[in-house]
Image: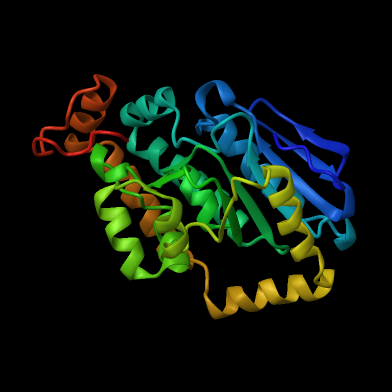
Amino acid sequence: MTPLAGFPVEDVLFKGAALRVEALAHGVLRIVLDRPEVRNAFNAPMIGELSRAFAEVAAIRDHGRARVLMLEGEGSTFCAGADLAYMAEQGTASPEENLENARELGRMFNRLASMPMPVVCLVKGAAIGGGLGLTVCSDFVLADPSAVFATSEVMLGLVPAVIGPYIVRKLGLAHAAPLMLTGRRIRGSEALAMGLAQRLTDPVESHEEALSRVLREFLAAGPGAARATRELLRRIAPLPDAELFEFTAHTIATARTSDEAQVGLKAFFGKAPSPWAPPGAERKA
C-alpha cells in the first residue's frame, strides 16, 4: 500500500478476507486488494467482496465523502489475474455453476464501470486478465513503466469475455483486438500509447508523490460536476446492455468447460507449452 502525504487514512470502512476499504482525507476512498501472497489474484471471495464494496461505495449519499475512488494492490503486484485454485475449480464446475460465476464476475466489473465518481487505479507489477479488467473500468491508470498488462486467456484456451466490452470501450477495436487475440504482454510506453495507462510514474518521483498529484487533479473538479460528467461519459460511451452482458457470461462459461480449455489449463499447471503453440511462442500467462 502507498502512504499518501496529505491523504491520511481516517477510517477503515470494511475489511474482508481479500480486501479492505479505507476512507482517506478529502473524500478519497481507497480499495486495497489484500492477497499479496498470491499477487492479489482473483478467487470467489475476492470477487464477492469487490462486488459488495463497489455497490456500497456507489451508494454513499454524502458526495463529499466519496469524491474519488482509488484502487490499489497490497505488495508488489496490482492483480495477477485468476488464482490457480480458482481456475481449476471453474474448469470442473457444472455449466450452471460456471454461468452463475460468470454473471457474478460480470456484475462486479459493471459496478466498477458504473461508479458515479471518478476512479483512479495504481498499477505496480502486473494487471493480468481480471486485473486488467479493473484497469479498463477505471478512468485513470497510473502505472510503473515496468508494469505488465495482458489478457492471457486465449493462450489457455479461454476467452476474455466479460472484460471484453470494457477493453474495447476504453481502447477501441484497433488496440483491443491484437491484445485480446494474442495474449501479448504490454508495458511502459506502449501501454501509455494504447491507453492502458494514462500516466507512467517517473523514476525521480515516488509513487506517493505521483499518486497524490493525480488525486489533487481530480479533486479540483466540483463533486457534483465530476459525477455529472461521469454520467455524461457513460451516455456517450455506453456500458454493455443486458443482451451483451448475458452473451459474455455464456461465452466464458462455455469456454471454461471446453476440451481446448482443459488441455490449455493442464499445460499451464504443468508449465508446459500448449499443443497449439508453435515452437518459440511465449508461454507466460
- Name the quadrant of the C terminus: top left
Looking at the image, which is closer to me, 194 or 144?
144
Q: How does the figure colour the protein chain or chains?
A: rainbow
Q: How far across and down, in percent of the image, does residue 111 sit?
A: 61, 55
Quarter of the view holding residue 276: top left
Q: How far across and down, in percent of the image, does residue 223 sit?
A: 83, 69
Q: Is residue 72 in sight in this rendering?
A: yes
Identify the residue at horizontal 26%, vertical 27% (top origin): 268
Identify the residue at horizontal 61%, vertical 29% (top origin): 75
From this view, report whether residue 62 is shown above or below residue 35. below
From this view, report whether residue 30 is shown above or below residue 244. above
- Name the quadrant of the N terminus: top right
Q: How far across and down, in percent of the image, does residue 186 sit?
A: 37, 50
- In the picture, measured across the screen, residue 133 lies left or right of residue 262, that is right
Looking at the image, which is closer to me, 117 or 284?
284
Looking at the image, which is closer to me, 110 or 199?
199
